[in-house]
Amino acid sequence: MLYSKASFDANQWNDWRFHMENLIRTKDQLAKWIEVTADEEGAIEAIADNYLWMITPYYASLMDKHNIHCPIRRQAIPHLDEMRNKSAGDIDPVGDTLNMKTRRVIHKYPNRVVMLVSDTCPVYCRHCTRKFHTTDVRGTYFKEGFDRSYDSDFAYIRSHPEIDDVLLTGGDPLFLSDGKLEHIIRTLREIPHISIIRIGTRYPVFLPQRITEEFCSMLSRYHPIWVSTHFNHPVEITDEAAAACDRLLRHGIPVQNQTVLLKSVNDDVEVMRSLVKALVGIRVRPYYLYHCDNVTGVSHFSTRPCWQRGSGLKERSPFVLNGTL
């Protein structure tokens, strides 16, 4: 019998450390959760020398065990198309490397910066904009371990008073310990011209148990803190995910969502309508809908611009929160 949430003791299932200690990294481990198809096996073997993959047991529990077209499987399990048409994409389509000012700081817009604080995620999105950074075995902007000194990163931000907004991302910042994250956030909050700190994370989607009371309490000491997360499909909005977002909200931390339009995952008006309504239902602001970036190894997720299909969706524009699209 294949594993499911019910296969585990509640104390185990509700402990995020259990999931991190049992990450799925091989096809044999994956086969304990779903019926792995020949194509999926072939894709796992094909990408072995190119891209990393990894899945939390929690996220695996959301997969349809028998349907290869499951939107969760599509996002998390390698696909043979990742190795096709590699010349059609770009390893850095958003220009991170062109705008890197220090080892971690990307300064692309006048008043805000990205700070890459991790090169690891609990689940590696197959459509990741930073696929080179997070999953390419020859990649990562860091080249060396990401735990080297942050002194030059903080010094750059201090020396640019026009910067008032810092987005912590990666990788996923919550891969770091609460103590490490607090050190980063506290240091940023001590810089007078930094008014907004944002955290970009998919842990509410991939492992909501990581959003503990202790974590939320720590963040609440450094307001204003915003969390930007990334639900792509209604299946991802579970009771656990709703509870994680509720914990953040009850500590005064607004949660907003960005969604990437992905072929054969959510490129359907009714799916997107259901997603938006479900997000509003758990008090998460549906903020942005993006077209998939032209990333090497990601072209199979690309869709035609929605306005050509008459759906009313616009590239990189906020959702209208009236229950319609």
Image (cartoon, rainbow, N blue to C red):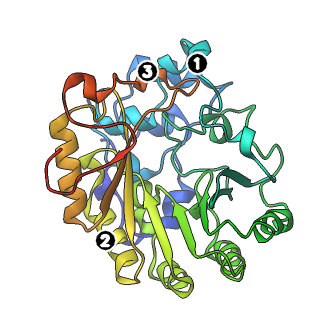
Q: Nearer the viewer, residue 308 or 277?
A: 308
Whether residue 140 is visible, yes or no, is no
Q: Position of residue 74 (x, y in %)?
A: 38, 32
Q: Position of residue 21 (x, y in %)?
A: 57, 58
Foreground mark, 2 or 3, reads 3
Secondary structure at numbered mark 1: helix
The three-letter amino acid code for the residue at tag 2 is Ala
Q: Quadrant of residue 257?
A: bottom left
Q: x, y percentage for residue 218?
A: 55, 83
Type of amino acid under label 1: Ala
Amino acid tagged 3: His
Residue that numbered label 3 is attached to:
300
Q: What residue appears at the point 43 percent right and 54 percent down from the top-left corner?
A: 206
Residue 118 location in percent, x, y? 67, 55
Q: Which residue is mark 2?
A: 243
The residue where tag 1 is placed is 46
Residues at marks 2 and 3 touching, judged by CB atoms closer than 8 Å: no
The quarter holding residue 95 reads top right
For the C terminus, the quadrant is top left
Q: Nearer the viewer, mark 2 or mark 1?
A: 2
Kindly indicate whether the residue at mark 1 contacts the one at mark 2 (C-beta within 8 angstroms): no
Direction from residue 281 to residue 5 in the image, left or right: right
- Residue 158 visible at all: yes
